[in-house]
Amino acid sequence: TPQSNAHTTGSDILWSGTPMVTILGDKMAQRVAASLLRAANLPELVCKDVQEYEDMAVALAVDGDRYMDVREKLEMGRETCPLFDTPRWVRNMEKGLEMIWDKHVSGEPPAHIDVPDVVGGPTMNPPPLPKRQEQHRG
């Protein structure tokens, strides 16, 4: 729906190789499908308004070759696109947590951070816990 879209269902749809079309909204819940499509290397399926959305949906429905091209792109990218690259997601999440931890340890107040994409390499080690937290670790 325009108010809340995609989330896990959208990920499952794309994993199955099924094209998905969306309209880019203003709020986070209205932008999930757009984020998923971009991470699946299909930004062309993100529409700016209802008319473009309808045109894209009709085009995919009536043009079998275009529809199959999108399906093939999804299926071929399933193992390589950022959306389904779990180790990459983990590395990026770990990098973000490390950046947050570094801010905390240096005494900086909580703030927005931009996490650079960590495209390769092994999973990062977590930062060491301060002595008082190590004692409470079970």
Image (cartoon, grey):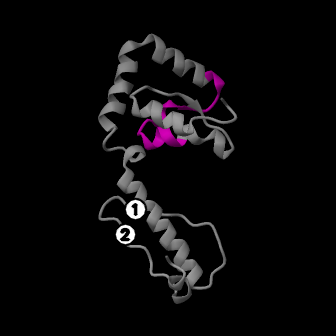
Amino acid type, residue under disc 1 in the picture: Arg
SS for tag 2? loop
Q: How far from the left and from the top, in percent, is residue 98?
A: 48, 72
Q: Residue furthest front?
A: 138
Q: Height in image: 24 above or below 64?
A: below
Residue 16 among those drawn in magenta? no
Quarter of the rendering occupied by the N terminus = top right
Residue under label 2: 124
- Which amino acid, by three-letter code, is at mark 2? Met
Tell me the crowding category of disc 1: few under 14, some 14 to 19, or many 20 or more residues within 10 angstroms, Cα based. many
Q: Give coordinates of residue 9: x percent, y percent.
A: 53, 34
For the point 42% across and 39% down, which residue is it? Answer: 40
SS at mark 1 in the image: helix
Contact check, label 2 and label 1, Cβ < 8 Å: yes
Residue at 42% of width from left, 73% of height from top? 126
> From this viewpoint, is residue 123 visible?
yes
Give percent across and percent down for residue 28: 65, 46
Mark found first going from the N terminus, 2 or 1: 1
Q: Position of residue 44 (x, y in %)?
A: 47, 32
Q: Which residues are magenta?
A: 35-51
**Residue occupied by mark 1:** 91
Q: Nearer the viewer, residue 17 or 127?
A: 127
Q: Is residue 114 left or right of residue 49?
A: left
